[in-house]
Amino acid sequence: MPDLPGISIIVPVYNGEKTIAECLESLLALDFPKESFEIICVDNDSTDKTSAILHRYGERIRILHEKKRGPSAARNRGLRNATGDVIAFTDADCTVAQDWLRNLILPLENSDAAVVGGRILSKQPCNHIEKFGENIHDHSKAIELYRPPYAITMNWASRASILRELEFFDENLLRCEDVDLSYRLFQKGYRFVFSPDAIVYHRNEDNYWGLTHEGFLHGYYSVPVLKKHDWLLKQFGHRRWNKRTYVDLASSFVESIRGNERKRSRCQLMFNSGKKAGKIVGSIRYRYVDL
């Protein structure tokens, strides 16, 4: 790959003492010229041993601090201090494949892509609930099937100039900030590409309560993004009242009891029930009905 661009890998971390070391070790083991990328860890005012763990890496990583809570503020701190022409994102509870970075930036070099998203798999070994998490973070569907498309910051690359043009992430959003930025990029006419060989492994929820809670957070924090982009979503047939959702919930309930794929249907039921509950609460909180 001639004329490699300078790359900044940004990793926000909050109370990540259990996962950040494994994440950093995988980044430091990348099959990529060391002089061509920097690793920026943004400590989002952690209260555990995260800071001490980060400092063990010395000059192999750059450590920044951001007191304003939320991944948007943390990533923006990294973006404002990044030296690379290309920005790559992953999360503190992820590990990356050795060839992740090479495969992630390739579409930026060989096409007019502005956003590249890679495959997000469950960390191994995993149970059926963790495996189901791959459906929640299905980047292929998010980029190639859904309209408007969106990318997930667990596994994302873009040119820094494009992110600066859009003024980075909305710091008023505590979650779903990647969806918001994706929608803004899409409205500017930028193209999204899925790179299946750029793989990260994520620590998915491993029990039904965790899966339901994750669904609740998805539903709750999606509401301000849906409200912000109401006009755009209407252009693609988004309905603020969708009875199909309730039909699917009922179907998942029946299948979880007597279907051939009871485990998968039970996961679907728990996640979507949590998501629907989150949307109800979020609709009240943000005064935007999306049920």
Image: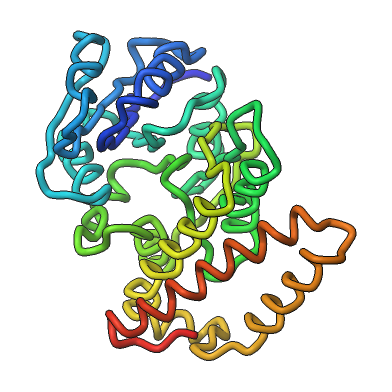
Q: Is residue 20 above or below residue 243?
A: above
Please state if 47 lies on the left or on the right of 124 as rendered.
left
Q: Position of residue 89 (x, y in %)?
A: 38, 37
Q: Quadrant of residue 243?
A: bottom right
Position of residue 13 measured from the top left corner of the image (x, y, whole percent): 28, 35
Residue 277 drawn at (x, y percent) = 47, 74
Nearer the observer, 145 or 26: 26
Residue sitting at x 30%, y 41%: 160
Residue at image position (51%, 13%) is: 31
Identify the residue at the far right of this view.
260
Report the front residue among 242 and 84: 242
Q: Is the residue 205 above or below the residue 61 in the image?
A: below
278 displayed left or right of 107: left
Q: In the drawing, does residue 264 fall left or right of residue 146?
A: right
Residue at 25% in and 27% down: 40
Q: 41 or 256: nearer the eye?
A: 256
Question: Which quadrant of the figure has residue 236?
Answer: bottom right
Give the camera-side residue of 166 and 213: 213
Colour scheme:
rainbow
Residue 144: horizontal and vertical position, in percent? 63, 58
Compared with residue 20, is residue 59 higher up or lower down, i.e. above or below? above
- The answer to whether residue 16 is left or right of residue 130 is left
Q: Look at 50% across and 62% down and name the residue there.
A: 215
